[in-house]
Image (cartoon, rainbow, N blue to C red):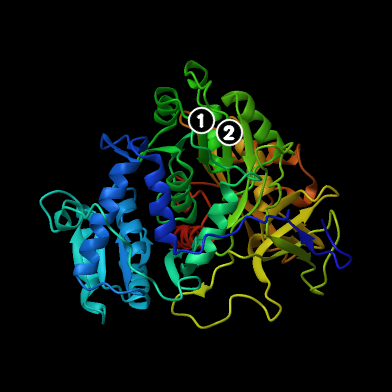
């Protein structure tokens, strides 16, 4: 629904929010599902029931309380996919602590800067990351204690103590707007920021996601999680099963065949993947050798996918695919519900309780259907801001400007074009690199591609250059790719800047191209070639 001012509204949702802190709500839901299997960690061969998670979470909460952790204290967690993360997260929430997951892949500079902002009381990490973390601790004013996950360590005091069978969570004052979790932004354009998720914002999102309108997850579902817990997608793949009663199967490392085998072996019903990974699975030669009949729903987010690729994936995996749009700051914004007729290539409609507008980049005025503009959002689960940064995240009217170029059709289905900062301008044209990358990925000799704009020597406009990873055994040439694109796209989208073949293209763990890093690599390569010429 949209009003006369072209502001669009998601469906009304009158489900009341529970008037309890987030940790209390999760604990109550965990108790409802008892001995049903909650989590299966394939790589470490660990299985936990919902009752196991209750015992482990309460044990952690009691130990944190005994160690003097207070509401508002920050607990940093550096792990990719440890089975100890869930009890630490829930246990921390039960005492009002703020959990801050961090990527183990952050270099010393990024890790130090973020931890200086967070000033955690404790840092928990996998043993193989301990040495790197120890180098950071002397730079922190909070002098945190470092605890390593795993047996025969101080972590045993948290996870193996005898928890009280009549545990009552402590009262947490003013919990609605209190920080619950700090998640890192994707860092696609530069330095990641700590995004604050409050008790209210997470509760509101979870209630809608498992409610009757969206029904993203049911108690009879088996969900396959591939995304690490330090990204918003991985966090909610952990949280939603806890409150919906679904079983989550977790892979910490994977290949296409390993994913397909896991779907078959564990009878997975829901798969959450990036578009790039979905296409890779569909193109895997052995795909049709696996029984994927239980798979009923594939959810893709993080980057765009064309209608053609979406149809190809649905055919290959014999499952319905729904594209969603989410950001760390606004969580889930757009998507198709379980009953929607999916429009290929679309990221769906506004979710319940969300309102949005698409504004012209020059005038700031709202535009109508089929016109490109920036997506601006307002919702109950819009995040509080960036930790340690007093700068307002929203404008003076309460709108969050996403930085994403989108448009919507007459049915109010949205289509994501690209990041505004990634849009390439050539003469009077605006070019989406994602559209060209999508076409290049369909070439039989291309494994991955990233398109950039570089200044042309002749007319000083931006010319398109692409970085390409060849498929194994492929000998595709620059000339072939340039001609391929020229025969399939308008002239202003041709690769007039040429093709560079690379061994890898920098991406975030959720599949987004890190264009600022790629640009540095390409510029460095040009300098080196001039030096050696």
Which of 383/174 is in front?
Answer: 174
x then y, percent, for residue 284: 50, 26
**Residue, disc 1:** 269
Q: Residue at x 70, y 34 (%)?
A: 308
The answer to whether residue 502 is above or below residue 119 is above
- Would residue 481 be visible to someone looking at this image? yes
Which of 367/165 is in front?
Answer: 165
Q: Are marks 1 and 2 in contact (CB under 8 Å)?
A: yes
x then y, percent, for residue 237: 46, 47
The image quadrant of residue 93 is bottom left
Mark 2 crowd level (few <14, some 14–19, many ≥20, 10 Å Cα): many
Q: Secondary structure at mark 2?
A: strand
**Residue, disc 2:** 297
The N terminus, quarter of image: bottom right
Q: Residue at x 42, y 27 (%)?
A: 257
Q: Secondary structure at mark 1?
A: loop
User: In the rendered view, does 316 fall on the left or right side of 95?
Assistant: right
Q: Earlier in the sequence, mark 1 or mark 2?
A: 1
Q: Residue at x 82, y 67 (%)?
A: 366
The answer to whether residue 490 is above or below residue 111 is above
- Would residue 193 be visible to someone looking at this image? no
x then y, percent, for residue 124: 25, 61
What is the count of numbered marks? 2
x then y, percent, for residue 270: 52, 34
The image quadrant of residue 7 is bottom right
User: In the rendered view, does 274 fall on the left or right side of 161?
Assistant: right
User: In the rendered view, does 516 fall on the left or right side of 102?
Assistant: right
Residue at the left extreme?
152
Give the Cα distance between marks 1 and 2: 7 Å
């Amino acid at each position: 629904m949209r009003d006369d001012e072209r502001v669009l509204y998601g469906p009304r949702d009158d489900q009341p929010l529970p008037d309890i802190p987030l940790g209390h709500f999760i604990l109550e839901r965990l108790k409802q599902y008892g001995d049903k299997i909650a989590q299966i960690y394939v790589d470490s061969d660990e299985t936990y029931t919902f009752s196991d998670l209750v015992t482990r979470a309460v044990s952690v909460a009691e130990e944190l309380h005994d160690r003097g952790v207070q509401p508002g204290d920050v607990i940093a967690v550096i792990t990719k996919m440890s089975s100890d993360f869930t009890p630490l997260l829930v246990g921390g929430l039960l005492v009002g602590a703020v959990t801050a997951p961090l990527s183990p892949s952050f270099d010393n500079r990024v890790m130090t800067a973020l931890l200086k902002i967070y000033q955690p009381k404790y840092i928990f990490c996998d043993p193989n990351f301990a040495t790197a973390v120890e180098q950071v601790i002397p730079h922190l004013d909070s002098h945190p204690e470092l605890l390593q996950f795993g047996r025969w360590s101080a972590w045993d005091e948290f996870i193996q103590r005898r928890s009280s069978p009549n545990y009552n969570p402590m009262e947490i004052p003013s919990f609605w707007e209190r920080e619950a979790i700090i998640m890192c932004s994707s860092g696609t354009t530069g330095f990641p920021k700590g995004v604050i998720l409050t008790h209210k914002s997470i509760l509101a999102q979870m209630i809608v996601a498992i409610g009757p309108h969206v029904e993203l997850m049911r108690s009879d579902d088996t969900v396959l999680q591939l995304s690490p817990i330090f990204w918003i997608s991985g966090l909610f793949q952990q949280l939603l099963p806890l409150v919906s009663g679904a079983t989550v199967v977790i892979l910490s490392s994977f290949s296409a065949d390993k994913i397909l085998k896991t779907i078959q072996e564990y009878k997975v019903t829901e798969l959450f993947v990036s578009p790039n990974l979905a296409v890779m699975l569909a193109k895997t030669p052995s795909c049709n050798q696996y029984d994927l009949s239980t798979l009923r729903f594939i959810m893709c987010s993080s980057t765009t996918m064309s209608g053609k690729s979406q149809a190809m994936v649905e055919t290959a995996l014999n499952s319905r695919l729904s594209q969603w749009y989410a950001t760390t700051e606004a969580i889930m914004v757009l998507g198709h519900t379980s009953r929607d007729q999916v429009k290929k290539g679309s990221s769906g409609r506004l979710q319940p309780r969300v309102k949005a507008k698409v504004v012209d980049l020059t005038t700031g005025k709202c535009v109508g259907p089929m016109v490109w503009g920036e997506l601006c959002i307002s919702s109950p689960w819009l995040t509080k801001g960036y930790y340690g940064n007093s700068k307002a995240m929203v404008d003076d009217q309460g709108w969050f400007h996403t930085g994403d170029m989108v448009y919507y059709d007459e049915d109010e289905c949205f289509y994501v074009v690209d990041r505004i900062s990634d849009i390439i301008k050539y003469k009077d044209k605006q070019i989406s690199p994602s559209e060209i990358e999508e076409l290049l990925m369909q070439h039989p000799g291309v494994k991955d591609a990233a398109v950039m704009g570089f200044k042309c020597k002749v007319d000083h406009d931006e010319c398109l250059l692409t970085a390409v990873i060849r498929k194994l055994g492929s000998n595709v040439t620059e000339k072939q790719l340039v001609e391929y694109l020229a025969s399939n796209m308008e002239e202003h989208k041709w690769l007039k800047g040429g093709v560079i073949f690379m061994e890898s293209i920098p991406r975030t763990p959720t599949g987004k191209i890190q264009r600022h890093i790629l640009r540095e690599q390409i510029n460095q390569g040009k300098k080196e070639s001039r030096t050696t010429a």
